[in-house]
Every structure is written in C-alpha cells, then in structure tokens.
Amino acid sequence: MLLEINERPFFENRKVAGIIGVARDITERKQTEAEQVRLQNAVEQAAQAWRLTFDAIESPIVILDLEGKITRLNRVAREVSGRSFEEILGQSVEEIGVGQPWQAMAEFVKLCQKSRVAMSGQTRDVATDRTWDIVANPYTRIGDEAEGVVLVARDITGMVKLQETLRRSERMSEMGALVAGVAHEVRNPLFSISATLDACEALFGEQTEQAEFMKMMRVAVDRLTQLMTELLDYGKPMLLTLAEGSIQEVLMQAINSCAPQSERARVAVCNRTAASDFPPVMMDHGRLMQVFQNLIENAIQHSPSRSTVTVEAIEVREKDGMFIDCRVMDSGSGFRNEDLPKIFEPFFTRRRGGTGLGLSIVQRIVEEHQGVIKASNRPQGGACMTVRLAVLASQSFVEA
C-alpha cells in the first residue's frame, strides 16, 4: 500500500497546539500512472519498431489518404524519388516524378479508389531500363469505408531479364541446332562447287569471255562460304577456356587486327584505353577478341571517310560489384530507333551483303562471359556498342 500524508499544525491562542495529519491511500493512482507510463513507452517502442520495419523494406511503399494525398512513404520510396519526406508529404503520387513507377502508380490509385478493390500490374521505365510490379490496396478501419490506398512497387528487373534470357536461350538453342544442320548439309555441295570453279579458272584462265561469269560465281561462293562458317559457329555449343586476362590487351589486339580495314576505309581508330590500368577479368582471350574485332569492323564500315572510331573502357561500380564498360563508338548515321530491339536477332541486318549473324554470335560470346552487350545511339551522332564485363570477385572486394 502507498500512502500520501499531509500534515499541518493547528493553533490555540496563537500557539501551536498540535499537528493534524491526513493519510490517503494512493496505491491505485500510482499503479494507474505507472501503467500509463508503461503503455506510453510501449507505444513509442512499437512506433519506432514500425518505422524501422517500414524503412527496412527494400521496395518503395507509399500510403495515401482518401483524397489521394501522400501521408507516409518509406526510405526506398524517398531514395527512388530523390526527394525528402517533407517535400513529398501532402502531394499526389503523379507529383513525385514524371517517370516510372510514379505515373503507373497514380493510375492504379485512381482505379483502386474507383473500384475499392486491389489492383496490380507491371510497368517498364525505358529511361532506366527497370521493370516494376505495382500493387495498390485500399485500407480500412473496422466498420469504416476505405480511408486510403497503400501502394507497393517491387523492382523485378532482374527476374524479367532472367526470364528473357532463358526464353532467348531456348530459342537460340533450337535455332542453333537447325542452322548447324543446314550448314552441314550445304558444306559438301558448296565444296564441290568451289572445287569445280577452281578447276574452270585453272583451265580457261582469266582471258576468256567466261571470266566475268566466273568472277561473279567466285563472289557468290565466297559469300556462301562465309555464311556457312558463321552458321556453324552460331550453331555449335559455346565452349570457353577461361583465364584471367587484361581487357586493355584484348582491345589493343582487336584494334591492330582491324588496321588494314581502317586504312582502306580512311577511318582512324582512336584507342583511349592504353594508359588505363584495369583489374583483370575472367575471359576466353580468343573469343573476346572476336567480339571486339567484330564491333570495330562494323564501326569502320558504318563510318564516313576521314572520320574516327573511338574505343574506350571505364570502370563502373554498382551495388552488385565492379565492372568494366568497353565502348566502340562510330561517327555514322547510328541505328534506327525501330531497329534497336532487333539488333542482336539472328539474320537481322541492314547492311547489304551482311549475314545478320555477326552480332548474334557476339552477344552469345559476351553472355557466356556473364556479361552484357547493349546498342545505343550517341547524342552527337553515330552508334555506340557497350560491352560490360565483371571484374574478378577478389579484385572487386579488394577495391571496395
């Protein structure tokens, strides 16, 4: 029991005659006050735990009121938007940003408010090449109508790219088996035609009236031979012999091998990697050189006379490691926008006399190196091919 005692003197004839004491049982009050303090601390701890949990979720989450105004958003949502909580509070979702996932989220909010049921879907941000899975859920209190909407945007870029890679691998495997079979069937008749043409040239020489026709046949045979070689290369399994290697060395050798072609075309090749010191990457030296030789040759072919093809490499640090981006840039007309999604498809080409397999083979080699290749247009004109390769894990760890 807890007692609260108050004492005060009482007087008689202006003298203290005694003391009056009053004792009150305050046990229940103190217990109530202690319980209130405990509950307040529990609420504060729960609120703090909720905020930490809310901010720990690695997907943007936005909470809106009935009027569609933002009342809460987590750390990832703030990071993706690039704005602070104070700047966003009270705004609508479409005011956060002009790109994705914000515009798609705004549409889902409208649909969710109208239907009062959960909405979900996907959207892709072309500018950042990210794909988002968006869910909008109305939230309520017991017995009340919907008070607002909870939005969750999940970055599924990695999963989408993996699915696309698997689908492409399946298509490539099927097509590879087909073209390899065709190439094998064509090889023997083609060899016979080539041998017969050699015999005719040796027998009749170049002074006969048939010389022009034999020259045309030689061009056609050479083109078919090149196509057959690329078909066989495309169709056979990609077997790499990987070892640590220098990206500068590969690029310099590829540039040197293309020197005769650049001289004939009067196109200079500028190497911006010679003075750089990059960490090693795991590579099949010959195959990777084939990649850059193909890219440099294509750049020379698409560049006007007396222009320059630039080859450069830079280190790029990402959350999942460190990479080297190798770029081959020309001064030509660049890619048509409608062609960019089809650049690496087998047999797609805009170049007269091309087989359309070169870049498909290049993509396969890069992907077998666990790399990525992208095609784009330069703002100042011309095309840019970028090959991204991962630095060795131990090197990346030391650098980090």
Image (cartoon, grey):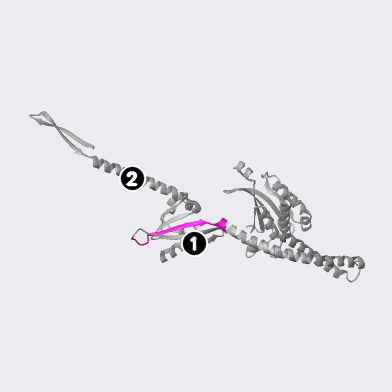
Q: Point out the residue furthest to the front here.
A: 1
Q: Quadrant of the N terminus?
A: top left
- Tag on residue 40? 2
Callout 1: 10 Å neighbours few (<14), some, many (20+)?
many
- Tag on residue 361? none
Q: Is 318 left or right of 301, judged from the image as shown?
A: left
Q: Point out the residue furthest to the bottom here.
A: 209
Quadrant in the picture for residue 357 = bottom right
In the rendered image, which residue does mark 1 sit on?
A: 104
Q: Amino acid at mark 1?
A: Ala
Instruction: Determine the secondary structure under disc 2.
Output: helix
Callout 2: 10 Å neighbours few (<14), some, many (20+)?
few
Separation of disc 1 and disc 2 at Cα?
A: 40 Å
Q: Is 298 left or right of 4, judged from the image as shown?
A: right
Instruction: Determine the secondary structure under disc 1.
Output: helix
- Label pair 1/2, CB-CB below 8 angstroms: no
- Is residue 354 visible in the rendered structure shown here? no
- Is residue 253 visible in the rendered structure shown here? yes
Q: Amino acid at mark 2?
A: Gln
Indicate the position of residue 97 as horizontal and vertical percent values: 49, 57
Indicate the position of residue 129 as horizontal and vertical percent values: 57, 57
Residue located at (71% from left, 63% from top)? 177
Quadrant in the picture for residue 333 = bottom right
Q: Quadrant of the C terminus?
A: top right
The front one of 379 and 227 is 227
Residue 157: within the magenta?
A: yes
Across the whole image, how many numbered discs are drawn on residues?
A: 2
Q: Is 50 left or right of 280, judged from the image as shown?
A: left
The front one of 69 and 287 is 287
Residue 196: within the magenta?
A: no
Residue range in magenta is 143-159
Q: Is 87 left or right of 333, judged from the image as shown?
A: left
